[in-house]
Amino acid sequence: MGTFCDNAHGAEVPDFPGCFTAADTWDQLAGNIQDAVELYCEDEDMLVPSPTPLEELMSSRNYHDGIWMMRRKAGT
């Protein structure tokens, strides 16, 4: 995730190439990420990939300046 212009935040979903979103606030971002993933998978006949281990992503040069957001599934 990155911050743009001191008031916008962008996010990329590494396990879904080309899946990204943005929001004006951190509170909006998590919901926008969920919406982006749902849209990415909409009308697709695909298997959802296993998540890339966080350690692997964190060690990638592509994400070295990133901020990591993890969200618990409701009810857990």
Image: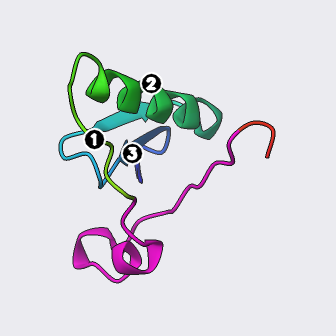
Q: Nearer the viewer, mark 3 or mark 2?
A: 2
Q: Residue at x 28, y 28 (%)?
A: 40
Q: Earlier in the sequence, mark 2 or mark 1?
A: 2
How many C-alpha atoms fall within 10 Å of the one at disc 2: few (<14), some, or many (≥20)?
A: few
Relative to 9, 14 lies left or right: left
Using the numbered discs, state the Cα–Cα distance from disc 3 to disc 1 in whole angstroms: 22 Å
Residue 36 placement: quadrant? top left
Q: Which mark is residue 47?
A: 1
Left or right: residue 9 versus residue 46 is right
Q: CA distance from mark 2 to mark 1?
A: 18 Å
Q: Identify residue type, mark 1.
A: Leu
Q: Position of residue 45 (x, y in %)?
A: 20, 27
The residue under the point 81% across, 38% down is 75
| Amino acid type indicated by mark 3 | Ala
Residues at marks 3 and 2, CA–CA distance in whole angstroms: 12 Å
**What is the secondary structure assignment of the residue under circle 2?**
helix
Secondary structure found at label 3: strand
Q: Residues within 10 Å of mark 1 (few under 14, many from 20)?
A: few
The residue sitting at 37% across, 58% down in the picture is 50
What residue is pinned by disc 3? Answer: 11
Q: Is residue 66 magenta?
A: yes
Q: Which residues are magenta?
A: 51-73
Q: How far across and down, in percent of the image, does residue 68 sit?
A: 51, 62
Q: Nearer the viewer, mark 3 or mark 1?
A: 1
